[in-house]
Amino acid sequence: MIDAFSPSRRPGIRAAMFVDFDNVYTGLQALDPVAAKRFAEDPKHWADALSAGGAGEESRRFLIRNCYLNPVVYSKYRTYWTRAGFRVIDCPSLTQRGKSSTDINLVLDAMDALSGTSGIEEFFIASADADFTSLIQRFRAADRMTTVIAAGAVAFAYREMADSVVESHDFVAILHGTTAEPMPAVGAGEAKSAPLRGKTRAKTISPAIKEVGEFVRNAPGPVAGALVAHRALTADPGLKADWGGCGKFGTWVAQIGKGIEYSPARGGWVWDTKRFSSADLPSEAEVQPGIEEQVARVTDVPALSAAQFRQMFVSMEARLRENPASRSELSRLVRDDCVTAGQPVSRNAVNFVIQGLSSVDFQLSDSATASELAAAWTEDVEELCRVALMEFDEAEKQELRRWASGGFVAA
């Protein structure tokens, strides 16, 4: 009798795909309507892109492809998915509030797959809905790889629980067919092997290593980890998914070597060992995290400076007047403008802000001003803090608004 996990079965990582159609489609509509249309009408294209492995790596075999959608709203897309080999599960609204039954159906099917005999090694959840965090925890507890496909902002805990995240702009690139190479497949046994996974992404890590090396070696002392991480992500936004296979920022810095050292003490610090040591780190009394660091840690709001946020809103106002083809294009242009203006931000950060503006129903029209964009974004940040149960006194609230708005909102 052949064991379910025996590699002598058919080649390829045994995987399962569970798609929350309503969540992904809605998120893509807010980011890039053209990409949303391709997601809904050509699922075979992007599913095949995720199935293909990188050079020298195994491909994936999606033994399960399930799509959960509300038939009252999205029934016209059913044929596209069934023809692409997906099992479509109707999830109509079961409440007066209009919430569909996707969550419960998806979770039940996923748990059946986890306990089944097919030996699923990797679970894909296509949804930015943090309600699936507990499901991801079950997968990890069972030693299965987990990948989240996001079309929108992803809650910090949800992101951290997954082994990897296909970010919004990466997924949009797949839908547009502009990715340089297929997403690499990672087997369940590779999850603990950071060096092995790191090798597959060496080309994407290099620009960030160079940037961090120059930044730390020219710094007048140990540098706060948040600043180093921002520099790395600016040079290579793709690192945000799982830090080049290392999983955590600290692990990624540690593998750089070349005299660059990291310590998680007192909020995390990086230094050049040829000039400094751990004795040069600031004392606990000297390290008091500012409001921006507190918010970034808890809510996953980009850890940018007020000047960077301000430049983002100024650039966004100018680009909106040009009526960019899509929000994906808008994020790229704004990112480039900020870099040119000397206030570099990552494309992930721009996408996060754009998604936040969508969350408060702000219309990205050619008449939107920088101050209006800043005010709407600040409203979203305050809501994220409220949901995260963060409490501030009046002075801290004013500091939060000044920071998030880039100074456009004074109080």
Image (cartoon, helix red, strand yellow):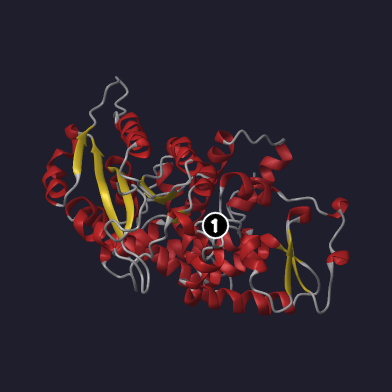
Location of residue 27 in the rendering, given as x and y in whole percent from the top left corner: 34, 47
Relative to 332, is 384 above or below?
above
State which quadrant residue 317 falls in. Answer: bottom left
Query: In front: 138, or 66?
Result: 138
| Residue 143 vertical placement versus 164 (above, below) | above
**Which amino acid does the dot numbered 1 rest on?**
Lys
Measured as percent of width and height from the top left, residue 148 is found at 41, 50
| Residue at (71, 42) in percent of width and height | 396
Vertical position of residue 171 compared to residue 322: above or below: above
Q: Quadrant of residue 269?
A: bottom right
Q: Which residue corresponds to mark 1?
A: 192
Q: Along the line of sight, which residue is nearer the eye, 97 or 93?
A: 93
Q: Is residue 321 visible?
A: no
Q: Quadrant of the C terminus?
A: top right
The residue depicted at 33 percent of the width and 37 percent of the height is 116
> Residue at left 35%, top 62%?
328
User: Which one is nearer the viewer's eye here, 287 or 67?
Assistant: 67
x and y percentages locating residue 170 in the rendered image: 38, 62
Q: Is residue 371 left or right of residue 268?
A: left
Observer-nearest residue: 405 or 290?
A: 290
The percent position of residue 350, horizontal first and vertical second, equals 47, 59
Is 25 left, or right, of 400 in this rendering?
left
